[in-house]
Image (cartoon, grey):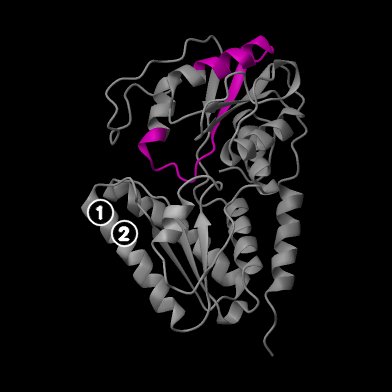
Amino acid sequence: MIRSPIPSVARFAALLILLCSPVAWSAQGMGILLLAHGSHAPGGHGHGDHAGHGPANVWNANVEQVARSLDERLPTEVAFGMADPQAIQAAVERLERRGVREIAAVPLFVSSHSPIIGNFRYILGLQAELAKTTRVRRLDRVASSARFHFAGAMDAHPLVSGILLERALAATDDAAATSVVVIAHGPNDEGENALWLRDMEAHARFLRERGGFRRVDVLTHRNDAPPPVKDAAREAFRRNVAEAGQGGPVVVVPLLLSAGGIEAEVEGDLAGLPYRFARPLMPHPNIGRWVETMAGSLLGQGSIGAE
């Protein structure tokens, strides 16, 4: 007798909610610095008395919603941009004005294996040099008396796996007949790309075990890489989806944080092929749970499940 994978998925989701339920924040002087891709919001992230002009695009709006939810429990500010020292300085100063002296910096990024993560750490004074694979030659550092703690990115965290599973199941009526292709942005460097794929394979194992899909593959799009690398990655992506489609329906699950990014380019690579495109990670409550889990671990608040 073949059992449906759905009950086990529901049980696992309930377990994740139980284990990663909101942290009972009690310490004074602690706060969260959310580091996020996106365009700048001049006055902060739009909550409370220190709100500024709200973000205009869906990407920023999704990040802002996460920040507002977290801010109900612990002072939280967002620094938008790709390791922008000025945006980070401004966000740190907003936290300091709110009495924060110990800051958990949480990068709202899919992978830790990217030069931007090292550059964030450099800006915050947590490492001596810029990231080895960055093309940036100089960045200012933050001036602050606060103490910084730095989290990893999402990597292979099970809360993220849970979102991918939910997105894939929502896009198919027959999981056992469906092939899933998880596609992420990916880095330029070959060594870092191997690490992205390693973490993505952990997500794939989760989807195979919990979702009962016909097959699950993972690829990176690498659309910022030099043309030969980018072209090869995009050709491999189209070929994979085409081959998977010969055996039944295909769901492409973007391991992307939000709409408003490269999803149009990703779908453009599949023109003429039959497939369904699932939703990206945000909005989803697991994102806020993940941030709180990581921050709780850094600040000693006892959150369960942080990596």
Q: Mark 1 falls on what kind of element?
A: helix
In the rendered view, does 240 fall on the left or right side of 156?
Answer: left
Callout 1 touching callout 2 (CB < 8 Å): yes
In the rendered view, does 14 fall on the left or right side of 196?
Answer: right
Residue 229 circle label = 1
Packing grade of label 1 (10 A; few <14, some 14-19, many >=20) is some
Residue type (three-letter) at the residue carrying disc 1: Val
Residue occupying the point 51% across, 54% down: 255
Q: Is residue 99 magenta?
A: yes
The front one of 295 and 219 is 219
Does residue 70 sit above or below 169 in this rendering?
Answer: above
Packing grade of label 2 (10 A; few <14, some 14-19, many >=20) is some
Find residue 116 and report its horizontal and vertical position in percent.
40, 34
Residue type (three-letter) at the residue carrying disc 2: Ala
Does residue 299 sit above or below 89 in this rendering?
Answer: below
Does residue 296 sit above or below 229 in this rendering?
Answer: above
The front one of 267 and 207 is 267
Q: Mark 2 falls on what kind of element?
A: helix
Residue 53 circle label = none
Q: Which residues are magenta?
A: 89-116
Residue occupying the point 42% across, 50% down: 185
Outermost residue, bottom side: 1
Find residue 22 and report its horizontal and vertical position in percent.
75, 39
Q: Say which quadrant the C terminus sits in.
A: top right
Q: Which residue is mark 2?
A: 233
Q: Is residue 152 magenta?
A: no
